[in-house]
Image: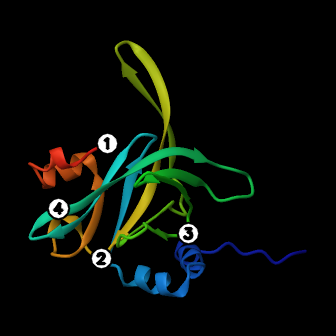
Amino acid sequence: MANREYLKDSESMAALVEQMPPALRKEYKDYLYLHLESAFPGRVLVVYTVRDGKPDDIALVTFGSIEIHQQLPPQIKINYKGRGSLISPIPERLADREVFIHVPQNFVFRWAGQREDGNLNFRPHYAVLLKMRGKPDRNIEGYTYAMNLKSFNELHPGFQDQVRF
């Protein structure tokens, strides 16, 4: 009979991080702010770098469908700068940005209903983890942040016209 032992959550996360390339693994471990963000198909994250105290180099991440298979980790389709990719529980750095994104190992999923004009529609809601050098409300010069569109508009009023879909 096989000797089977489930890992603690912290051990599972450490094992996932160990699968990253060494340089990215070090960078991931050095970043301080880990944020659980809710997502669903069509949801947008705003990614930007603070320059002269203001958002600059603004780009969007759009979430798509989710794939769940019996023998594979959950994967979420994202679109960043016009390029599609899949994220999984192994942290991945957004191309050319100091932000990591991944599916939490404690996977969160809801089949959420919404009424609109008398019609009932359902769509998947899931969580993603974002890891950045610091907390977005600190607005530190040179840091790159990612946040949902509503939070971005609240933190940076007057920049809505720079966010293009």
Give how far across and how far down residue 60 sits, in percent.
Answer: 34, 52
Of the 4 image quadrants, the one containing the N terminus is bottom right
| Residue at x-position 15% and y-position 75% | 141
Q: Amino acid at mark 2?
A: Arg
Q: CA distance from mark 1 to mark 4?
A: 17 Å
Q: CA distance from mark 4 to mark 3?
A: 28 Å
Q: Could you tell which of marks 2 and 1 lies nearer the N-terminus?
A: 2
For the residue labelled by badge 3, is the local secondary structure a helix, a strand or a loop?
Answer: loop
Disc 1: which residue:
165
Residue density around tag 4, few if under 14, some if 14–19, many if 20 or more, within 10 Å: many
Residue density around tag 1, few if under 14, some if 14–19, many if 20 or more, within 10 Å: few
Asked whether, in this view, residue 40 is left or right of residue 16, the answer is: left
For the residue labelled by badge 1, is the local secondary structure a helix, a strand or a loop?
Answer: loop
Give how far across and how far down residue 165 sits, in percent.
Answer: 31, 42
Disc 3: which residue:
90
Q: CA distance from mark 1 to mark 3?
A: 28 Å
Disc 2: which residue:
133
Q: In the image shown, does 49 or 110 lie closer to the viewer?
A: 49
Is the residue under label 3 in contact with that under label 2 (CB below 8 Å)? Answer: no
Q: In the image shown, does 132 or 122 lie closer to the viewer?
A: 132
Is the residue under label 4 in contact with that under label 2 (CB below 8 Å)? Answer: no
The label nearer to you, 4 versus 3, is: 4
Q: Could you tell which of marks 4 and 3 lies nearer the N-terminus?
A: 4
Is the residue under label 3 in contact with that under label 1 (CB below 8 Å)? Answer: no
